[in-house]
Amino acid sequence: MQLSLRTRFYFALLITSSIFLLIIIIADQSDFNVGRFIYLELAFNLILAIMSYEVTCLGAGSGNGEIFYGFYMATVLIRILLTLTIFILYFILMDADKQEKLVFILSYFFFYFAYTILEVKHLMSKLQDKRGSE
């Protein structure tokens, strides 16, 4: 049985998020400093990946390259603006030391790039399947 591209994306997202969550829980239980907001960072980047994938799929479904690039650039802009908003709120409202700020930044960007790579990998599959069917 061949799974649809969307189903494969969500399955890969579930597996990836489960692995990240398991690693975070193990690190947290072993008294490793994972930061106060690590679970929120994971959830936020998961939601960003889903939103970005769905919006970009709308553009890919149009069959027009210019529309696809417009949708993709819009999702990149939204992701950057939301990330900047999170950073600004964190650095203005949180009273954290340098180590905690560093942990926040590194873990946030790790999740950001991991989910972005996963999303792009599955979008490329969608575009290649669309090109192959033409």
Image (cartoon, helix red, strand yellow):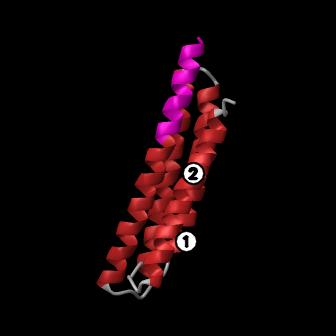
For this rendering, which residue is in front, 94 or 3? 3
Is residue 93 visible in the rendered image? The answer is no
For disc 1, the marked residue is 40
- N-terminal of the pair, mark 2 or mark 1, is 2
Q: Amino acid at mark 1?
A: Leu
Is residue 5 placed above or below 114 in the rendered structure? above
Q: Residue furthest right?
A: 1
Reply above or below: 21 against 28: above
Q: Nearer the viewer, residue 60 or 7?
A: 7
User: Magenta residues?
Assistant: 120-134
- Residue picked out by circle 2: 13
Residue located 54% across and 17% down the image: 131
Q: Gap in Å between the C-alphas at discs 2 and 1?
A: 16 Å
Q: Nearer the viewer, mark 2 or mark 1?
A: 2
Disc assigned to residue 75:
none
Q: What is the secondary structure assignment of the residue under circle 2?
A: helix
Give the quadrant of the N terminus: top right
